[in-house]
Image (cartoon, rainbow, N blue to C red):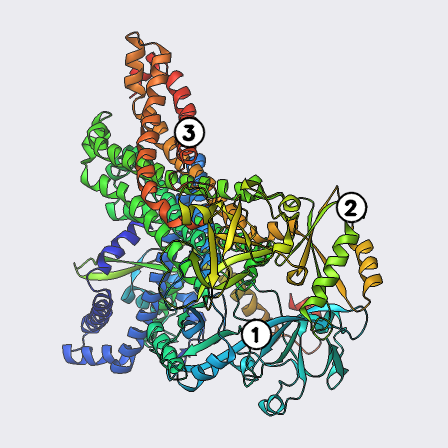
Amino acid sequence: MSRLPVLKGTLDLLVLRALSWTPMHGFEIVSWLERAGGGALDLEDSALYQAVYRLEERGLLEAEWGVTENNRRARYYKLTAAGRAFLRAETKNWMQYAETVTAILTAGKDARPAAAS
Amino acid sequence: MIRDGVRRAFRLALRRRDRWEHEVEEEIKLHLALRAEQAVARGATPDEAHQAAVKKFGPLVESRARLLEAARNREARMQRTEYLSDLRQDLTFAVRMLARDKGWTAVTVATLALGIAAATAVFSAVSNLLLHPIDYPGANRVVVVFQQPTKGNNTGVDVEILPGTQVIREWKAGAPSFESLEALASGQAELRTRGEPATLNVTYIEPTFPRFAGVRTMLGRMFTSAEVDAREHPAVLGEGIWRTRFGADTSIIGKAITLDDSTYTVVGVLPANLRTPRVGASPTDVWLPLDLRVDQMGATVVGRLKPGRDLAGAARELDSAYARSTSTGEVPFRAVVTTPATRVSVRDSLTMLGYAVGLLLLVACANVAHLFLARSTSRQRELAIRVALGAARGRVFRQLLTESLLLAVTGGALGVLGGWVGLKAIVGLRPSALTELELAHLDATTLAVALAVTLATSVVFGLVGAVQSARTSTHDALKSGGSRSATTGRGRGRRLLVVTEMALSAMLVVGATMLVRSVINLQRANLGFEPRGLYALTLTASKAHFANADARGQLLSTLAARLTTMPNVRSVALASTQPTWFAFRIGRLEIEGEPVPPGPATGFISDNVVGSGYFKTLGIRLVQGTAFTDTTLEGTQVIVNERFARKQWRGVSPLGKRLRIAVDGTESWLTVVGVAADAATGGATLSESTQPFLYFPAADSDAKAIMLRVDGATDLAQPIRTLVRSLDGQVTPKLESVEVQMSQAISAPRFVMLLLAVFTALALVLAAVGLYGVMAYSVAQRTREIGIRVALGATRTRIARGVVAGGVTLALVGSAVGITVALWGTKFIEHQLYGVAQRDVVSFVTTVVVLLASGVVACVVPARRALAVDPMTAIRAD
């Protein structure tokens, strides 16, 4: 399986999803994405930090300095209420979009409109 | 959220930028380390692991730059959000706190708004009149030039002489200080084109005048100096007459109009905003050329000085230019160069109004100050509790600042609005004598000063509470009695403020009462004659028609005889001037048996040449002697007014004394046959109309007007017109009500008085509010003490009396201070007073009474509150 470039805009969604479980620092987010995506995502690590800063700027995340299991200082990110709402809404949109695109791409020649939904 | 914000706010102080840059670096470092560890765990060597980590991270330099950029955006945005959210929070809280104290908030906002509005509106009007009554370009270099007798005037009359064209020619030739000098002359002419003949205001100007005044013709062109030199007759219409009389007809250019007996060609129309330098003059209907080559008297001169030249130097230049042309090398009349603003009538009361603006603003600020002080004291416990509950002092400080600013901004906005409305009202109510007010606009400087002063007061005194809360320990403030010791000092401060306010108000009340009484005197009997039912009849005709002075006099004399037989006409008299004209003789006043005063014969003395029955017709009382019994004795009798008698003979009866106005010394002596009561018949303004005055008996040829005393409200205009036309068809009669003229003559002082009265009332209200605040506050502070005293048997009357006495004492002390200052200050408005002494007892007594009354009123509510104190509750409270 070849590596998949991350579509513009979806990275934000993925980061929010990662943080929906628990606050994480940057490397934990990367690791979680790698694990959850089965290593299939093609992503530079720095891009992730850019996404995080952007989300923080938009008030979807907030950050706090904390300590890792190995006693290292790290910046922990967690979802804000706005971030959670955004994640919920955007996930729904994305799912609908993906389903629709999938349905279209897999539909037969004589597909009726009803078949798509 | 807030705690985060507070933390950030604190880190902010430690150079925010360094901090987040450092954080980004730290984050990258940690990431690379963790990534490398992961690789090592999978069996890579540390070197390989590090390289792999860097590779996975992306190009290090560019990535770092991008991250720093992203972090910077993030920080900037968050800072903004934080600031806005704090601000919103502060504002919400401020609004809630202010809403809880509705009464206090309303009074404070109203005080601020009133102070700013009144100060701005009135000062804008006053500064317009005092500083820029005429808005020619380079207004601060524009000057008015006239002359005064070089050796002064021994008759006690102030005169300004309008220079003649000969003098102006010399001035123009030899005055390098001036960028330009313009001469204007004014007059009246009868328009005999299109419809009924009408009397127009004519101003004779040089072709350069519109450019000097910064105005261009709105239609056609200005006449040229070539036309003036060629003695052509070009005319430029004023916008007003062009619109009314000529229906804004654009084809008027090139047409001929007839003024008196001459025909003029209209070459242009000048807009209504072109004004002559005479403050208060009525608008010009027609502009005609002034030919300086023709010798004539009495031109108004206005000039623009070169930058940096001073008035006195310019005057000296003019004098030496003039002196070169006289045979003696001396000037009988010296030039006076002055600013247009000094020529505004009622200048002194306007100046006083200007000071009143300052006083009112001070009163308003004092009020705001102790409103804030009172509030901060009552809030001390609240603030202490908030600090005790963990609010940072900086935050409390900021909170109080927000409250003050919110109040100041609200008050300021209302104040600006009120100022604008107020100025519109003032301009709308302006009397014709102050017509220049129409140019008044909201003065930006005044507005800025008023806003700044009130803002500063609110902020400073609003924060006193914060400072106080920072100084007193939380523990002390929370103890119920703890505030008592801290407030004594400021209680004294507040009382001092109230005394100051009362003193300022007292000064205003003294001044206002004096001016009000002056105006009342002016309107009433103290005029010295009875304007009601009195009319002045004058005749206008072409110059040629009355070329012979006797012609007019003869006609007037015939007319007077016929008028006496008219129904409702009670009496009729001939005179050379009517009450609002300023007429004088020039010469040297000599009293028989007294040394002849030195100097040239250039003294001025106001006079009127009157026919028999003049005193009876005007209702002027003769204090001594008789009226002229026989006007055929022209040249041997004279009647003086009381002021003249007082000045020359100081209590000795003047009857039988002889005097003369000498020019060459051959004049015959005149015997004083009577002393007339002072009457305001000597001119259009107060100062002119109360000068020393001489009456001479009239021969018919001297008459220029007929004075009529009429019964009831009969309209004589039409019958008189018919009568005049039947005697001489080429003459137009002009009948003017002296009552109307007099009310116009005093319209300016009356207007200023009105403003001042409104102003004083405002100041008084503000001062009373201040006093109320202090008394109410002191009652609130002493609730417990009052409770104890009641419990110990003090009667309630005694308690109430104590409160009122406290307030009244403050009012009394304040008025004592104010009156002391006013005793000295009233000399500045002495010229404006009429029939009121500078130490007018009535005004001073009124002031004390008014201040006492306002003191008592301000104490009513606090006293009732003190009465309502329930001893049990008061003692148990806290």
Q: Which of marks 2 and 1 is nearer the N terminus?
A: 1
Say whether disc 3 or disc 2 marks the residue closer to the N-terminus: 2
Identity of the residue drawn at 19% across and 77% down: B49
Q: In the image shown, does B693 or B248 lie closer to the viewer?
A: B693
**Separation of marks 3 and 1 at Cα, in angstroms:** 52 Å
* B35 vs B733, nearest the viewer: B733
Q: Residues within 10 Å of mark 2 (few under 14, many from 20)?
A: few
Residue assigned mark 2: B714
Chain name for mark 2? B
In the rendered structure, the answer to whether residue B830 lies left or right of residue B7 reads right
Same chain? Circles 2 and 1: yes
**Quarter of the image where one finds residue B437:** bottom right
Q: Do the residues labelled 3 and 2 touch (CB within 8 Å)?
A: no
Image point 28% across, 12% down: which residue?
A: B789
Q: Give the structural element (helix, strand or loop) at label 1.
A: strand
Give the residue type that dot 3 points to. Answer: Val
Q: Do labels 3 and 1 share a chain?
A: yes
To which quarter of the image does residue B873 belong?
A: top left
Judged from this view, the residue extending furthest toward the top is B793
Chain of the residue displaying label 1 = B
Q: In which quarter of the image is the C terminus of chain B?
A: top left
Kindly identify which residue carries mark 1: B185
On residue B643, the disc is none
Q: Give the x, y percent position of residue B131.
A: 43, 64
Q: In this view, does B660 lie above or below A33?
A: above
